[in-house]
Image: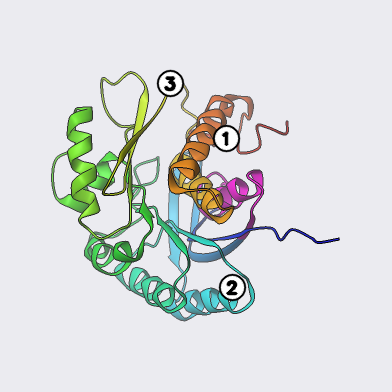
């Protein structure tokens, strides 16, 4: 009797001691969607639902060895990057991924925590644009992150979002998912996927809750899980959009922490 191998996805990101974002959120999303998760920790943060207290960067040699150890043993189908912190870490990760050339690379250009704390130094943005994004199958910026990457103002209309998605693609990634959750005055939350040939819109009702910690990490990881499992890019994005919308909708059931609580990664199971 033949056995089906479980797809494997790798997250390269920071650790969130509160468990709602970063490595912890990524592994939860992988597991919830039936994908085995491996991890490379780039930074250790002391944080909870109220904010980030401190950040300790992992030495570059340790980051590099973590990546080598995973790829030397595991059949990684997709990689997701999150918090990288500084230019040196971005360059280290970019170098190792260029060596191993995973089939799919989803780059979430994490710059700020939900609390507003900086998770990417200003001097790292250019390295991200020149070294890592050109390797990406997909980048998943929100509107503030997209504005930083392009050096422009945030869009205020869906039409401006479309133009921004096209500009972001010129940075070299295979596709762009521009997340519209920050678009003021919009009814539904609309994300736009642009691959150079076609623009896809993914819409979901806005959910009134303060418990959205880890939303961006979870969405990018859910897309990576879909790609690892063999879905096409639009299919993976749609599955991830449905998953994160349901996880946000169920977030208030968790009652975790006293600030911006996490989304409910395992809403399907309890």
Dot placed on the residue nearer the N-terminal end, 1 or 3: 3
Residue 183 appears in the figure: yes
Measure the alpha-carbon separation of dots 1 and 3: 25 Å
Which color mode does the image show?
A: rainbow
Q: Tell me which residue sits at (22%, 58%) in the image.
A: 171
Q: Is residue 120 left or right of residue 12?
A: left
Do residues under tags 1 and 2 come within 8 Å of each other at their CB atoms?
A: no
**In the rendered image, which residue does mark 1 sit on?**
257
Q: Is 33 contained in the magenta span? A: yes
Residues 200 and 61: in front is: 200
Residues 85 and 133: in front is: 133
Q: Nearer the viewer, mark 1 or mark 3?
A: 3
Instruction: Find residue 264 and report its horizontal and vertical position in percent.
Output: 60, 34
Q: Tell me which residue sits at (33%, 51%) in the image.
A: 175
Q: Nearer the viewer, mark 1 or mark 2?
A: 2
Image position of 146 with respect to 61: above or below: above
Give the extent of the magenta segment: 17-37
Give the quarter of the figure containing the N terminus.
Answer: bottom right
Give the quarter of the figure containing the C terminus.
Answer: top right
| Disc ID at residue 128 | none
Q: Residues within 10 Å of mark 2 (few under 14, many from 20)?
A: some
Q: Is residue 253 left or right of residue 163?
A: right
Q: Is 240 contained in the magenta span? A: no
**In the rendered image, which residue does mark 2 sit on?**
70
Q: Residues within 10 Å of mark 1 (few under 14, many from 20)?
A: few
Measure the alpha-carbon separation of dots 3 and 2: 38 Å
Image position of 263 with respect to 77: above or below: above
Residues 183 and 123: in front is: 183
Instruction: Find residue 252 and report its horizontal and vertical position in percent.
Output: 58, 25
**In the rendered image, which residue does mark 3 sit on?**
205
Instruction: Find residue 121 and report its horizontal and vertical position in percent.
Output: 28, 60
């Amino acid at each position: 009797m033949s056995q089906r191998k479980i797809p494997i996805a790798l997250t390269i990101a920071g650790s969130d001691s509160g468990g709602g974002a970063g490595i912890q959120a990524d592994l939860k999303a992988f597991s919830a969607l039936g994908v085995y998760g491996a991890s490379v920790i780039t930074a250790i943060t002391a944080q909870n639902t109220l904010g980030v207290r401190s950040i300790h960067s992992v030495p570059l040699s340790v980051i590099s060895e973590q990546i080598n150890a995973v790829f030397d043993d595991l059949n990684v189908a997709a990689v997701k990057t999150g918090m990288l912190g500084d230019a040196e870490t971005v360059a280290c990760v970019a170098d190792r991924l260029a060596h191993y050339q995973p089939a799919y690379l989803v780059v979430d250009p994490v710059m700020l925590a939900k609390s507003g704390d900086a998770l990417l130094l200003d001097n790292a943005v250019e390295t991200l644009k020149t070294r890592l994004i050109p390797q990406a199958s997909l980048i998943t910026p929100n509107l503030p992150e997209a504005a930083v990457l392009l050096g422009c103002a945030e869009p205020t209309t869906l039409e401006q979002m479309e133009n921004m998605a096209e500009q972001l693609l010129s940075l070299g990634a295979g596709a762009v998912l521009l997340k519209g959750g920050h678009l003021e005055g919009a009814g539904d939350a609309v994300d736009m996927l642009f691959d150079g040939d076609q623009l896809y819109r993914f819409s979901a009702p806005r959910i009134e809750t303060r418990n959205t910690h880890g939303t961006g990490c979870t969405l990018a990881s859910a897309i990576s899980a879909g790609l690892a499992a063999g879905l096409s890019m639009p299919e993976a994005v749609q599955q991830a959009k449905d998953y994160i919308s349901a996880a946000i909708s169920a977030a208030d059931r968790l009652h975790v922490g006293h600030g911006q609580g996490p989304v409910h990664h395992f809403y399907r199971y309890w």
